[in-house]
Image (cartoon, helix red, strand yellow):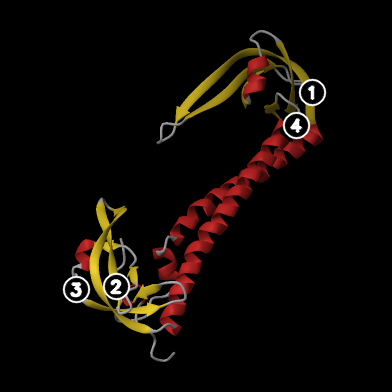
């Protein structure tokens, strides 16, 4: 839920950071960590193929295309090939392998196919030599992209929070008049959020962080509020809290 305006004590950096959207940074961070772990374990498997991979010939028993849809309705196709082969010193083994579209398309049912398997784990195979290492590199690249997104998602709200704290500490404390409650496109628990809009004594306009409308009723149009002038914008005292008298 949105925080209540803080008019009694200064607001901390962490609270401002989260209120300014900093929590969004946790999403690409989690994705980055997961992809990094997947890339690491996939690379370990690739190294095992280098050390103990055995080449053999199997037979294509079937192939399949599985279609899934995300919440936006976007379609994702996954390609599978089922092969049967006989590992050295073992009984025949059937494995279904998730693969790329090109490998899927050239794997006609009933035809022989060259594959590689791990001596210590025969049901782990490659239908294209080095595909495990390639998958690791691709996953690592995607992790790097999400890592960059994480840094951007971290920097933007952090910069805003720092600017707000600097304005509270060093900026001029002025009076402004509330002009309206601006309806936003943000909803929390199906409740629309609003921003407090104001105009200061020099005619400059500003707006607050989003709040529930019932919270802003304590600051009706025409009421006077305190703001802190920053380098590029002003901040409502209710957003950042009052200036610490010791500073």
Secondary structure, mark 4, is: loop
Q: Is residue 75 above or below residue 56?
A: below
Circle nearer the N terminus (1, 3):
1
Residue 29 lies left or right of residue 127; in this view the side is left
Quadrant where the N terminus sits is bottom left
Q: Which residue is mark 1?
A: 55
Q: Is residue 108 visible?
A: yes
- Point out which mark residue 130 bears: 4
Circle nearer the N terminus (2, 3):
2
Secondary structure, mark 2, is: strand
Q: Residues within 10 Å of mark 1 (few under 14, many from 20)?
A: some
Residue 58 spot, x, y in % from top left: 72, 15
The residue lying at 23 percent from left, 65 percent from top is 180
The residue lying at 41 percent from left, 35 percent from top is 72
Residue 235 vs residue 24, the one in the foreground: 235
Q: Which residue, as the protein is rendered here, is positioned at the far bottom?
A: 246
Separation of marks 2 and 1 at Cα, in angstroms: 75 Å
- Dots 2, 4 in contact, CB < 8 A: no
Residue 117 lies left or right of residue 207; in this view the side is right
Residue 90 spot, x, y in % from top left: 73, 20
Residue 40 lies left or right of residue 79; in this view the side is right
Q: Which residue is mark 2?
A: 199
Separation of marks 2 and 4 at Cα, in angstroms: 64 Å
Circle nearer the N terminus (2, 4):
4
Residue 190 vs residue 85, the one in the foreground: 190
The residue lying at 38 percent from left, 79 percent from top is 228
Q: Residues within 10 Å of mark 3 (few under 14, many from 20)?
A: few
Q: Which residue is mark 3?
A: 222
Circle nearer the N terminus (4, 1):
1
Rendering quarter of residue 55:
top right
């Amino acid at each position: 839920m949105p925080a209540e305006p803080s008019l009694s004590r200064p607001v901390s950096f962490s609270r401002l950071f989260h209120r300014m959207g900093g929590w969004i940074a946790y999403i690409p961070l989690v994705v980055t960590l997961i992809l990094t772990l997947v890339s690491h374990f996939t690379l370990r498997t690739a190294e095992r193929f280098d050390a103990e991979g055995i080449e053999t010939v199997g037979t294509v028993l079937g192939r399949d295309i599985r279609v899934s849809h995300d919440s936006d309705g976007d379609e994702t196709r996954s390609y599978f090939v089922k092969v049967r082969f006989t590992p050295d010193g073992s009984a025949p083994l059937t494995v279904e392998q998730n693969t790329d579209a090109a490998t899927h398309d050239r794997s006609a049912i009933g035809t022989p196919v060259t594959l590689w398997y791990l001596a210590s784990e025969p049901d782990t195979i490659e239908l294209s030599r080095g595909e495990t290492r390639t998958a690791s590199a691709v996953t690592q690249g995607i992790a790097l992209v999400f890592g960059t997104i994480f840094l951007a998602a971290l920097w933007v709200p952090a910069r805003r929070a720092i600017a707000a704290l600097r304005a509270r500490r060093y900026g001029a404390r002025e009076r402004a008049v509330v002009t309206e409650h601006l309806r936003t496109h943000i909803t929390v628990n199906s409740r629309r959020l609003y921003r407090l809009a104001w105009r200061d004594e020099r005619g400059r306009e500003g707006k607050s962080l989003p709040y529930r409308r019932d919270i802003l009723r304590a600051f009706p149009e025409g009421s006077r509020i305190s703001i802190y002038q920053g380098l590029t914008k002003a901040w409502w005292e209710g957003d950042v809290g009052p200036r610490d008298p010791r500073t």
